[in-house]
Image (cartoon, rainbow, N blue to C red):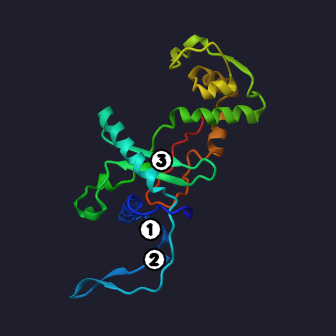
C-alpha cells in the first residue's frame, strides 16, 4: 500500500524479496521500470518500457531490520523451525515490518527452497492467542452487558470450567474489565466470554474480519478459520 517509503539498504532488500515472491503481481497494470523479455533464439534481454510509476512501500527499514534480528533470535533460542512477525501502525494499519523466517537471499533467489520464499505471515493460519481478548472485550462493551470499570473475580489464578483448569500466568483476585485486558487474564476473559455467549462472540469475531482475507497487497493470502456454531 502507499505510505512512507522503506528507504535504502535493508528496505531495498525487503522490496527485492517481495518482488521475487510475486508481490508485484498485484500491480501488473503499472509499468514500474525496465522489464525482462524472452526473444526466440536470443534468450533473456532487457527491453525498454514506458516511463513507470512510483510504488511506495509502508515498510520502515529500521524497524524491519530490528524485527528480522529479533525474530531470528527468538526462533533460534526456542529451537523453532520457522517464525513470522508483523509490525503495524495501529492508527492506520500500515505494515511497517513483515518478517518470515527462514528467508532467502534476494540476490540468489534461485538457490532458495520454496518454503524459504513463502511469506508465512500471509500464507499460514495460526491461532490468535491472547490478542483475541481484545475481541472479547470489544464485544462485551458494545453489548452493554459490561463496562470498562466492572469487576471480575479472577479466582486467584486457577478456575475450573468444563472439567478443565484455567490458569493465569500470575494470580489475581479482583480485576476490572480494563485491568483484565491489560494483565491478559485468561480467567477474567473466559468469564466475560461465557456470559456473552458463543453467538455474540462469533459475530464479533466475524465483524473484526476473522475468517476472511485482509486484502493485503501480497499473493498467497489465506483466510483464517471461523467455524460455524453447532446447530
Total marks shown come to 3
Question: Relative to 28, does residue 179 appear above or below in the rendering?
Answer: above
Query: Residue 70 in the image: x percent, y percent?
Result: 38, 41
Q: Which residue is mark 2?
A: 32
Q: CA distance from mark 3 to mark 2?
A: 26 Å
| SS type, badge 1 | helix
Q: Residue at x 35, y 64 (%)?
A: 20
* Quadrant of the image occupied by residue 146: top right
- Residue 126 located left or right of residue 72: right
Q: Are marks 1 and 2 in contact (CB under 8 Å)?
A: yes
Task: State the separation of the CA atoms marked 3 and 1.
Answer: 19 Å
Q: Look at 42% across and 60% down and name the residue there.
A: 11
Residue at the disc numbered 3: 86
Question: In this rendering, would 160 be left or right of 37?
Answer: right
Q: Residues within 10 Å of mark 1 (few under 14, many from 20)?
A: some
Q: Which residue is at a point 56% across and 64% down the rendered structure image?
A: 2
Residue placed under numbered mark 1 in the picture = 24
Give the camera-side residue of 106 and 161. Answer: 106
Circle 3 sits in a helix, a strand or a loop, which is it?
strand
Mark 2 residue crowding within 10 angstroms, few (<14) / some (14–19) / many (20+)? some
Question: Mark 3: few, some, or many residues within 10 Å (few <14, many ≥20)?
Answer: some
Q: Earlier in the sequence, mark 1 or mark 2?
A: 1
194 left or right of 220 in image: right
Tell me the quarter of the picture where residue 151 sits.
top right
Mark 1–mark 2 Cα distance, whole angstroms, equals 10 Å
Task: Give residue 23's position: percent from left, percent from top.
Answer: 43, 64
Amino acid at each position: 500500500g502507499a505510505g512512507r517509503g522503506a528507504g535504502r539498504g535493508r528496505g531495498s532488500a525487503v522490496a527485492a524479496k517481495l518482488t521475487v515472491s510475486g508481490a508485484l503481481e498485484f500491480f501488473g497494470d503499472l509499468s514500474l521500470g525496465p522489464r525482462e523479455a524472452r526473444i526466440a533464439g536470443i534468450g533473456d534481454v532487457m527491453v525498454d518500457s514506458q516511463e513507470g510509476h512510483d510504488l511506495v512501500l509502508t515498510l520502515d527499514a529500521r524497524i524491519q531490520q530490528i524485527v528480522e534480528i529479533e525474530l531470528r533470535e527468538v526462533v533460534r533460542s526456542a529451537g523453532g523451525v520457522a517464525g513470522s512477525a508483523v509490525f503495524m501502525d495501529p492508527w492506520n494499519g500500515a505494515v511497517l515490518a513483515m518478517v518470515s523466517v527462514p528467508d532467502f537471499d534476494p540476490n540468489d533467489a534461485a538457490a532458495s527452497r520454496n518454503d524459504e520464499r513463502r511469506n508465512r505471515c500471509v500464507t499460514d493460519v495460526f491461532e490468535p492467542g491472547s490478542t483475541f481478548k481484545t475481541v472479547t472485550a470489544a464485544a462485551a462493551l458494545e453489548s452493554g452487558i459490561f463496562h470498562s470499570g466492572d469487576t471480575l473475580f479472577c479466582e486467584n489464578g486457577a478456575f475450573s470450567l468444563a472439567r478443565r483448569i484455567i490458569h493465569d500466568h500470575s494470580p489475581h483476585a479482583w480485576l476490572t474489565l480494563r485491568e483484565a485486558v491489560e494483565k491478559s487474564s485468561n480467567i477474567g476473559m473466559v468469564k466475560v466470554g461465557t456470559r456473552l455467549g458463543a453467538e455474540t462472540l462469533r459475530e464479533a469475531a466475524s465483524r473484526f474480519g476473522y475468517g476472511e482475507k485482509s486484502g493485503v497487497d501480497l499473493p498467497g493470502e489465506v483466510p483464517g478459520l471461523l467455524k460455524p456454531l453447532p446447530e
